[in-house]
Image: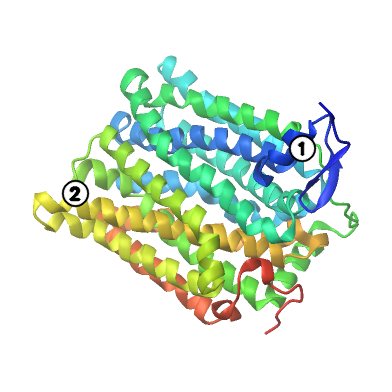
Amino acid sequence: MEAVEAVEVGGHRVPAAGLPTEVGRKLPWWLTDGFGRLFAGQAVSAVGSQVTFLALPIAAVFLLGATPAAMGILGALDNLPYLLFGLGVGVVVDRFRRRKLMIVADLVRAIAVGSVPVAFALGRLGFEQLCVVVFVVGAGNIIFDVAAQAQMPDLLARERLVAGNGTLQTATSLAAVGGPGIAGQLIAFVGAPMAIVLDSISYVVSAVFVSTIREPEAPRTRSEEPMREQIASGLRLVRADVRLVGIAGAAATISLATNALFAVFVYYLAMRAGITPAGIGSLFMAVGVAGAVGAVTMPMLAERIGAGRVLVAMPLAAGLGLAAIPAALELAPAVSTSVLVAGSLVFGLAMISFSVLSAGLRQTLAPVEARGRVLGTLRFFEWGTMPIGSLLGGAVGQVFGPVVAIELASAIFACAAIWIVASPLAGMRPAAEAPDATARG
């Protein structure tokens, strides 16, 4: 079978490495070369992360007796690295090879989560170790995330960035479909701590896939400016584009609400709604289905009605769906479960839809030479509110109860739409058509 020297990937010609002509032509764009390898690694890692996402709080609540306040602290430590290192990570990503950073982040996270089942097997697992583990994993998350976001435009053409982010998010959402079910079965057979072994293995698999990406990284002029000056440069670049400010403000508000919710959500489902670990896994599975639907359909929806309208509608829909969850317990048993599930589905679909669209817009609007700095700066503001949200949700849940904490998170979600309405984003067309020039306010 005849082989070709190069194939079209991400808008440019890359070596085909002996790929048969017929295969090269039939592969969909999202499975070709570098992006396909990143996609495969993230798909595997997402399954493992979903297991830990469910198993770790279950271990904290059921095995270690964690209270809502303790769960808030755990969630805050998981996300504290975004607040501590967010601005500096962007500079590091611009200075060093991004794929090497991604590989190191994967391996460090593998070691961190792998320590949980080891400690449990030795009878030494404690809440303090969980706090250390989530902090280390959070640091690895921000390094990998910013580096991967900065890599995307090297792997995909501009017009495919939103769809590419949607593809990655679809993998994450589909993992949320199977992950909780896998977690539930593993927890039932080996216990929550031992189930986390799967996550450690998945990080190693992700590192292997990233190491095989062949596309060259976009050439960058290495700045000799001190880190402080480069951080200030990233801040100026974000501030100069009011669209980026709008994205950052809305995403920061959503992060605040999301983490206020998840600080008490598992506790609420287990202790107030009386749902078993298997039932909690099933609910998260349903949310994953909704998220996958949102990730797949969002680009088409943005094309049809406009990206700006989608950005406005999704936080409002997420808040509405979330408000239905605690309200479900006040209804008759025959309908309460249906309302709780329906609210969770709307919440999952809306939250993932906003995430996919905003990610594509960030990458489109960020200047090439300072992409790491800009994306790192955005992540600092967008995800720096996570530990605040976790502490807020845990404190409100401890003092007033988890229902009040969930209702507060619902209201905060809806407020995210204000940032979009107050910026040029509300009238924006699809992300692929966003102009290169920054919109200055």
Q: What percent of the width, then of the height, locates residue 378?
A: 64, 62
Foreground pick, 391 / 360? 360
Q: Which residue is mark 2?
A: 337
Report the residue at 74% width, 72% height from top.
Answer: 236
Q: Is residue 401 visible?
A: no
Question: Which amino acid lies under the numbered mark 1 shown in the image of this protein?
Answer: Lys
Question: Which residue corresponds to the image point at 19% horizontal and 60% vertical from the top-left?
Answer: 327
Residue drawn at (63%, 75%), measured in percent from left and top? 243
307 to 265, vertically: above or below:
below
Q: State which tag comes first along the sequence, 2 or 1.
A: 1
As rendered, which of 3 and 102 lies closer to the eye? 3
Q: Position of residue 326 (x, y in %)?
A: 22, 57
Q: Residues within 10 Å of mark 1 (few under 14, many from 20)?
A: some
Say how many tags the image has.
2
SS at badge 2? helix
Front tag of 2 and 1 = 2
The residue positioned 49% from the left and 34% from the top of the image is: 47
Task: Examine the rendered structure and indicate whether residue 291 appears above or below residue 129.
Answer: below
Residue occupied by mark 1 = 100
In the drawing, does residue 172 fall left or right of residue 437? Answer: left
The mark found on residue 339 in the picture is: none
Percent x, y of residue 84: 61, 53
Q: Which residue type does callout 2 highlight?
A: Thr
Residue 274 is left or right of residue 146, and the answer is left
Quarter holding the N terminus is: top right
